[in-house]
Amino acid sequence: MTETLSAAPPAATAEPIVDMRGISIEFPGVKALQDVDFRLFPGEVHALMGENGAGKSTLIKALTGVYSVDSGVTRLAGRPVTFSGPAAAQDAGISTVYQEVNLCTNLTVAENILLGREPRRFGAIDARAMRVRAAELLDRIGLDIDPVSVLGSHPIAVQQLVAIARAVAVDSHVLVLDEPTSSLDSDEVAELFRTMRVLRDNGVAILFVTHFIDQVYEISDRMTVLRNGRLVGEYATAELSRIGLVSAMIGRELGELEEVERLATHDTAERSAPPVLRAKGLGRSGAIEPFDLEINPGEVVGLAGLLGSGRTELARLLFGADRADSGRVEVGGNPLHLRGPRTAIAAGIAFCSEDRKGEGLIPDLSVRDNLVLAMQAARGWTRPIPRRVKNELVESYLETLDIRPRDPDALIRNLSGGNQQKVLLARWLVTKPKLLILDEPTRGIDVGAKAQIQKLVAELAAEGLAIVFISAELEEVVRISDRIVVLRDRRKVAELAGPDVGVDEVMDLIASGEPERERAAS
């Protein structure tokens, strides 16, 4: 599907508030955008869709003045504009709320909303007037919290709504929401969507970027799809099916997508080898209650549970990133005293953190240097990897994992999220681990890269690698796992196996918190 379809604008107006035409941006060796058109109308929620690396972030940065364009023109309310930076864009009525909320958590809600625009009296900040004004803005978006409460005392979902209230405070006509739901639960998403509808009905144009397809169909009026830096099409949401959207995003037809889906699931095989890892009574006070767990060669063990259920805490104990205060661990049948990650790595345990930017990548290093980092650390810095060996390894994994661009000298920070995730996977695969722990490996990446990573997990398991797979998406956990460990309130409550395990059963266990039980694979 490559034809550009022109979706009808909202009935309220025929004039776009944002009209970008022929936008092209090129970085060294990368054509990030090529002759892209984009329209955004007042009073609509418009989803910007595409794989990682499709050009979504680049288009947003072109709109908000972070990047200068090589060619093309942007019109705001019919007038050509060029912004020197995000501040200039905000002054013109374009505000952006990012996934990582860029506010001061040590200040009050009111101080954050009106930071830099505080009402003053006799030259000093008028605290009372600031509280009143902040309360008015919070009421405008339907958020009932105390303006004098400290922002950091509220969950991320509320902090994002406060960021939106700040955008309202500067009379934004265009609101860009970049992955606002990635860290929210279903109730928090519903609250965010309620606020978005209020703003939309008041005439605000909302540009919504997300990787959750169901959310796109729940909240958006229209959508624009990008692929490989080019415009695929502009669509009315109600007129494009989900499979049509996926096909447009990744350039594959239905049959190919179904094939990827089948490859992402593998059968549980009979295994006679001892467990790769066995944990008995392993726990950490305040993090997760003591649990038992066995992980076998060639097996994918999924961890399912809500945010805060103990999924990441369990994974960090297995890797020695946190020190257990109870229980024991065996690797290959031999006791292992996990003094820290170095001990785990030496024993063949690898861990991809959910925070790939904060705990995984070194943004100013190249793809090559990031990829071989774990292998070099295991050898010690006094024994550098020979350059020929390093180049052969890097070239091999760039091809095997389809990392784009296929340039080992590219800075890792310039890669899309999905390709950054692949580099992290390659980093650990180079060390030939026995157990690979993947904490949210598909979070924040597009459907195409997600399918590739799921397929890779299935292939690695088929080759005998033991894998722990953590995801907030239950459908993904169920689809890819041989066994599922269900966690609730930092406690293991169930262990399920077999081809008939479904999402509903896992959700019931998460909700009920029944005592731990196990069901043999059928």
Image: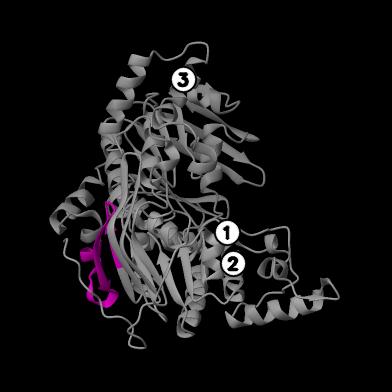
- For this orientation, the residue located farthest to the left is 255
In the rendered image, residue 185, in percent from the top left (x then y), is placed at 50, 63
Tell me the magenta residue range: 224-245
Are the two marked residues, 2 and 1, in contact with CB atoms closer than 8 angstroms?
yes
Seen at 40% across and 23% down, the residue is: 431
Circle 2 — which element?
A: helix
| Residue 240 is inside the magenta segment | yes
Residue drawn at 46 percent across, 25 percent down: 374
Q: Nearer the viewer, mark 3 or mark 2?
A: 2
Give the percent coordinates (x, y) of residue 16.
Answer: 36, 77
**Mark 2: few, some, or many residues within 10 Å (few <14, many ≥20)?**
many
Label 3 element class: helix
Q: What mark, if any, has residue 376 been given in the picture?
A: 3
Q: Amino acid at mark 3?
A: Gln
Residue 299 falls within the magenta-colored stretch: no
Type of amino acid under label 1? Val
Return the residue at label 2: 163
User: Tag 1: Cα neighbours inside 10 Å, few (<14), some, or many (≥20)?
Assistant: some
In the drawing, does residue 300 fall left or right of residue 310?
left
Q: Quadrant of residue 409?
A: top left
Q: Is residue 105 above or below residue 338?
A: below
**Cα distance between the residues tagged 3 and 2:** 42 Å
Q: CA distance from mark 3 to mark 1?
A: 35 Å
* Residue 121 in sight here: yes
The residue lying furthest to the right in this view is: 122
Report the residue marked by disc 1. Answer: 101
